[in-house]
Image: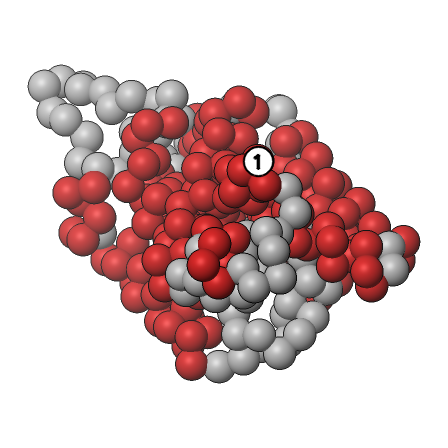
Amino acid sequence: MKREPLFNIPTVVLVLIGIFTVIQVLRADVLDAFDRNYLDELFAFIPLRYDSSRLIDGPLPGGVGAEIWSFVTYAFIHGSWTHLFVNSIWFLPFGSAVARRFGTARFLAFFAVTAAAGALAYLFAHGGEDSAVIGASAAISGTMAGAMRFAFQRGGPLGFWRENDEAAYRVPALPLSGVWRDPRVVIFLVVWFGINFLFGATTLPLTGGDQPVAWQAHIGGFLAGLLLFGWFDPVRARVDSGVAPG
């Protein structure tokens, strides 16, 4: 009998967490306050960067390049070890599920797109502000939404009728039209959005400061993962015996 390993985590997920960790070591234990601030200004997502009329002290470092790359690079920076730990705990199950389905290249593209969507949502909500957004939460929210599209399906990782481990990650995805018809998915959505609106009303010490959680970025990443999942999904819906999967 084939035995599945207890921790079957795709390499791409471990590598990303490793990169997060190296950057956190650099910020927390190597750089002084001046260099850490410069690193954040260069790679964090800062809405003020896109409003030149409010840049009283001159442009932020990085120029046009930073205006582009910071839509993704902010996801690799974390404000504290607690911030990194919490994000990693959520990233391991949901990121692993999506990575096993997508493969490395598609997963990295999905990670980048959902991170960028989170930054864009934050920009719409906080245009011109000088608060910096850091952390992988938006991209992780995207993997949560992506996993939700197939994890509850018949034969999926959380389905009642699961045949074998590898096949569980190849079941046809739930179509968008079916999202509101699956009670388990609806409960997941209600709880997830409820938690994030709670974030909007409170300040949690996750980022190493007194700034509130960037819940708008979470929602942007989640919606991108939910709506754009089909663009990346290599598993196509099958029609068996004339019946399309629901």
- Colour mapping: secondary structure
Residue 222 place in picture, x, y as percent? 38, 51
41 sits to left or right of 246? right
Residue at image position (35%, 22%) is: 235
User: In the rendered image of this protein, does residue 81 appear above or below residue 91?
Assistant: below
Q: Which amino acid lies under the numbered mark 1 shown in the image of this protein? A: Gly
**Above or below 16: residue 244:** above
Q: Secondary structure at mark 1?
A: helix
Seen from the viewer's position, the closer of residues 215 and 164 is: 215
Q: Percent position (x, y) of residue 69? A: 56, 38
Which image quarter holds the C terminus? top left
Q: Position of residue 193 (x, y in %)?
A: 35, 65
Give the image location of residue 130, x and y in percent. 54, 65
Work out whether residue 75 or residue 120 is closer to the camera in this orientation and state it.
120
Residue that mark 1 sits on: 65
Q: Is residue 4 above or below residue 205?
A: above
Residue 184 in sight from this viewpoint: no
Which residue is rendered at x = 37% and y = 43% of the image?
Answer: 225
Number of disc labels: 1
Q: Is residue 167 visible?
A: yes
- What residue is shown at x 37% (from left), y 27% (from top)? 233
Residue at 48% over, 29% down: 109
Q: Quadrant of the N terminus?
A: top right
Question: Is 103 situated left or right of 39 in this image?
Answer: left
Q: Quadrant of residue 95?
A: top right
Q: Measured along the vertical axis of the image, is residue 175 above or below residue 88? A: above
> For this rendering, which residue is in front, 41 or 61?
61
Tell whether 241 sits left or right of 88.
left
- Horizontal relation, residue 153 to residue 75: left or right: left
Q: Nearer the viewer, residue 59 or 44?
A: 59
